[in-house]
Amino acid sequence: MVDQARARRLAKRISQIVAAALEHEVKDPRLARVTITDTRVTGDLQEATVYYTVLGETVDAEPDFTGVAAALASATGVLRSLVGAGTGVRRTPSLTFVADIVPDEARRMEELLARTRESDAEVARLAAGARPAGDPDPYRVPRERDDEE
């Protein structure tokens, strides 16, 4: 079993190498808007899972996820060679690229929070003009007891 701290350091180094290679070495235009978000290495240092996100060209345009996945699949050999040269480990881990869903989930959570804030504001607006049911202050006047019992 490998030290977990070593696996974390290797994962961080792999992220740096892959990000630099995508920016400077790999000349595929489909990979221009790819950002490496995280890398996880197995305990035996044999496999590395690299998580990435794809930024859209414009605000309205959706990114080409299938094209990016195909480009990363075709560049895996080159990237693995660069990782092997840059890390100096005995066996270079195999690279698997997975689209990161965290930004999409964060966007969805922000939309839910915005919707919740709007409904809270609506409830506060309705409550501002509301009157309590029954006596305005039922505890101020002592209750009358029924002495006939």
Image (tube, rainbow, N blue to C red):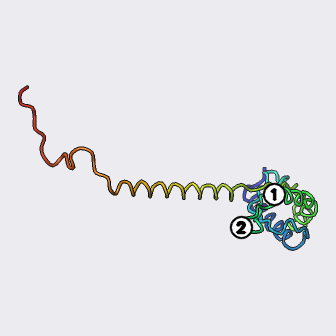
Residue 117 coordinates in the image, percent (x, y): 49, 58
> Mark 1 and mark 2: span between their CA atoms?
16 Å
- Answer with mark 1 or mark 2, whichever residue precedes in sequence: 2
Residue at 34% in and 57% down: 128
Residue 8 coordinates in the image, percent (x, y): 74, 59
In this rendering, would 115 be left or right of 73? left
Picture quadrant of residue 5: bottom right
The amino acid pointed to by label 1 is: Phe
Nearest the camera: 77 or 34?
A: 34
Please identify, in this view, whether the residue under mark 1 or under mark 2 is nearer the observer: 2
Q: Secondary structure at mark 1?
A: helix
Tag 1 near tag 2, CB within 8 Å: no
The amino acid pointed to by label 2 is: Val
- For the image, the number of numbered tags is 2
Quarter the C terminus occupies: top left
| Residue designated by label 2 | 59
In this rendering, would 7 be left or right of 92? left
Q: Secondary structure at mark 2?
A: loop
The residue carrying pointer 2 sits among few (fewer than 14), some (14 to 19) or many (20 or more) residues within 10 Å by Cα, namely: few
Residue 79's tag is: none
The residue carrying pointer 1 sits among few (fewer than 14), some (14 to 19) or many (20 or more) residues within 10 Å by Cα, namely: some
In this rendering, would 39 be left or right of 83? left
Residue 65's tag is: 1
Residue 96 coordinates in the image, percent (x, y): 84, 54
